[in-house]
């Protein structure tokens, strides 16, 4: 059984992912400010200066590090640019240097926020053109990982799933409105290719089986709007779909500029692993 360390163990992605894998692997959650405990996993205190990361990796015989940490609030990234560039950019590079030196596999979780949104379904080879500090700092993170660990896997994605009470997900937020029969406004002109964390994790395993490295898009096959996603959830919950209200992103004047199309092309992983991605409507049923 492999020993896996989730760096950023209190993150939304780490929480959902570790709950899915906890019966299959020995999981360790590396935690900084927030302490969490998940049944079937081991929590470890680890500061962002990484002073003892190499010791932890050696002592627990870690085979795989999954970097889920990051500063993901787009508006806050503009306010705290230095922190954004450290957490999203330089920190992943430091982790990659350590994993490379110890010959431990690294999976770095990137984003679909790396482009200007002027085309449909971006491939791994498209030129990056991020529009805001969040996107720019995540682009730097990819570069730093590649520079420091040639064997690392970089995953571009946009995930959903049932989060913990302290960190509800986007799909949780939609469901919470619908449960109360409250209306929720969702963007009808912002496109993406969301994937459930379980499907994300399954596809990561497929890449690990063939010892893949480099950049991979792991996304759904379907390009949809945030509004369409809300309708899917309402349908799944047998709720009135009229509770989901379409709105254009320009109506939200307090938002930092962001791409209108973040959809990703997933042909590369499907061709290499010979495994298709489960239809999005089936993934909604996981909720």
Image: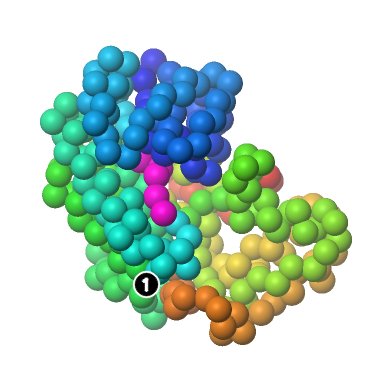
Total tally of numbered discs in the picture: 1
Q: Quadrant of residue 162?
A: top right
Would residue 80 be visible to someone looking at this image? yes
Quadrant position of the C terminus in the picture: top right
Between 164 and 157, the one nearer to me in the picture = 164
Q: Is residue 147 magenta?
A: no
- Looking at the image, what colour scheme do you see? rainbow
Residue 150 is situated, as x and y percent measured from the top left of the image, at: 15, 43
Residue 204 is situated, as x and y percent measured from the top left of the image, at: 39, 39
The residue located at (56%, 83%) in the rendering is 253
Q: Is residue 159 left or right of residue 58?
A: right
Between 199 and 279, the one nearer to me in the picture = 199
The residue located at (68%, 56%) in the rendering is 173
Q: Count neighbours of disc 1 (C-alpha within 10 A) and say few if under 14, some if 14 to 19, many if 20 or more.
A: many
Residue 55 is situated, as x and y percent measured from the top left of the image, at: 24, 21
Above-or-below relation of 179 to 244: above
Magenta part mainly helix, strand or loop? loop
Task: Name the residue tied to disc 1.
Answer: 132
Would residue 269 be visible to someone looking at this image? no
Q: Is residue 33 left or right of residue 280?
A: left
Between 218 and 13, the one nearer to me in the picture = 13
The residue located at (64%, 63%) in the rendering is 229
Element at label 1? loop
Quadrant position of the N terminus in the picture: top left
The residue located at (41%, 36%) in the rendering is 32
Between 40 and 112, the one nearer to me in the picture = 40
Q: Is residue 136 left or right of residue 25?
A: left
Residue 278 is situated, as x and y percent measured from the top left of the image, at: 54, 47
Above-or-below relation of 230 to 105: below
Residue numbers of the magenta segment: 66-71
């Amino acid at each position: 059984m492999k020993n896996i360390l989730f760096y950023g163990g209190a993150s939304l992605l780490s929480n959902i992912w570790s709950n899915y894998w906890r019966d299959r692997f020995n999981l360790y959650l590396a935690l900084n400010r927030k302490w969490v405990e998940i049944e079937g996993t081991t929590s470890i205190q680890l500061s962002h200066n990484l002073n003892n990361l190499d010791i932890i990796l050696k002592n627990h015989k870690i085979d795989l590090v999954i970097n889920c940490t990051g500063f993901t609030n787009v508006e806050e990234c503009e306010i705290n640019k230095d922190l954004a560039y450290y957490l999203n950019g330089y920190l992943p590079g430091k982790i990659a240097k350590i994993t490379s030196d110890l010959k431990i596999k690294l999976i770095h979780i990137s984003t679909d926020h790396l482009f200007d949104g002027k085309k449909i379904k971006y491939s791994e080879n498209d030129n990056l053109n991020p529009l805001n500090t969040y996107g720019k700092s995540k682009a730097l993170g990819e570069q730093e990982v590649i520079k420091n660990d040639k064997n690392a896997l970089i995953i571009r994605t946009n995930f959903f799933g049932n989060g913990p009470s302290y960190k509800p997900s986007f799909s949780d937020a939609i469901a919470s409105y619908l449960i109360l029969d409250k209306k929720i406004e969702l963007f009808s002109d912002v496109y993406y290719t969301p994937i459930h964390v379980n499907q994300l994790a399954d596809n990561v395993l497929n890449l690990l089986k063939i010892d893949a490295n480099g950049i991979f898009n792991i996304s759904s096959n379907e390009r949809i709007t945030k509004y369409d996603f809300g309708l899917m959830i309402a349908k799944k919950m047998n709720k009135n779909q009229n509770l989901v209200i379409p709105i254009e992103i320009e109506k939200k004047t307090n938002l930092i500029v962001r791409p209108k199309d973040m959809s990703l092309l997933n042909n590369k992983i499907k061709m290499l692993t010979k495994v298709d991605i489960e239809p999005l409507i089936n993934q909604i049923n996981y909720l």
